Amino acid sequence: MSLANRAARSITTRDVPELVVPGLLGGILVGSFLLPFVTFLGRTGSTPVLETLARPTSRAAIRHSLLTAPVSTAIATVFGVPLGYVLARGSFRGKRLVEALVVLPLVVPPVVGGAMLLTAVGRVTPIGRVAAGLGVPLTDSLVGVVLAQTFVAAPFVVITARAGFGAVDERLEQASRSLGYGPIATFWNVSLPLARRTVVAGIVLTFARAIGEFGATMMVAYAPRTIPTQIWVAFIAGGLDDIVPLALALVAITLLVVAAIQRSAHAPAVGDG
């Protein structure tokens, strides 16, 4: 047996007992994730899922969510990815304040975030009155839903993009600049492709957070209803069994998002051999 094989076998043998305790603790957490899914899915047998999803209110909620969440994600991406790059590479006065503001929507309860948005763009505010006068109300509209979703979800793409760009070797960017490429070309052709897996994961997480947003959306735009809002209405009106179909639709969309995360994490990067 070669030295390399003996070393590999030694490491594997040593790692097994060392992973027992972490594995048990992690297994308990995984079990706590799995149990609610199993018990919830067990209620689907007595619920007319397809009939409920065919109702106009359900179809409208699904349509509104599938329309607003991608828009919110696109807005967060267009502005959040460059901000993540600036935070990863830049050093400027007020950087800590910007970082704190990025994290703020994550630590503030969504309902409080919705209240903050109302104080900024509500109908009685200057911005809200101007927007309503132009025929684009910022509350109780799809625009309001997008504002709420973007507020709570955008930090995910900023934070993950910053981590991705921070892991890129700056010497590669310097080499690009030395070859005559400008900062934008370097960002587009070097930095972004190298950080793309992390950025894509952040985009998918942003979409998942946006489509599941309830608290801020309920405050800013109770109507038109999205899936989470309609789930709440159905729960108040008919109890737990009435929310099963829409909840299943939301879970199905979420599972597709998780699958996209897994695929993006394992897909070979451009230029990988």
Image (tube, grey):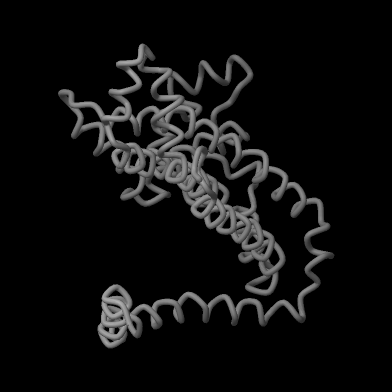
Is 260 positioned to the left or the right of 31 in the image? right
Is residue 243 or residue 1 the one in the foreground?
1
Relative to 208, residue 177 above or below? above
Is residue 263 or residue 244 the one in the foreground?
263
Is residue 93 or residue 53 the one in the foreground?
93
Q: Residue at x 47, y 30 (%)?
A: 122
Measuring from the top left, give residue 22's x and y in whole percent: 30, 80
Measuring from the top left, give residue 42's x and y in whole percent: 66, 82
Is residue 255 or residue 19 the one in the foreground?
19
Q: Quadrant of the N terminus?
A: bottom left
Q: Quadrant of residue 94?
A: top left
- Can I make out residue 180 in this image? yes
Q: Residue at x 58, y 15 (%)?
A: 133
Q: Residue at x 38, y 44 (%)?
A: 160
Relative to 13, residue 102 above or below? above
Q: Residue furthest left?
A: 93
Is 253 positioned to the left or the right of 144 in the image? right
Measuring from the top left, give residue 181's x and y in whole percent: 38, 14
Q: Quadrant of residue 51?
A: bottom right
Measuring from the top left, give residue 211's x and y in whole percent: 57, 49
Relative to 263, residue 191 above or below? above
- Can I make out residue 22 in this image? no
Q: Residue at x 51, y 19 (%)?
A: 129
Number of labels in the image equals 0
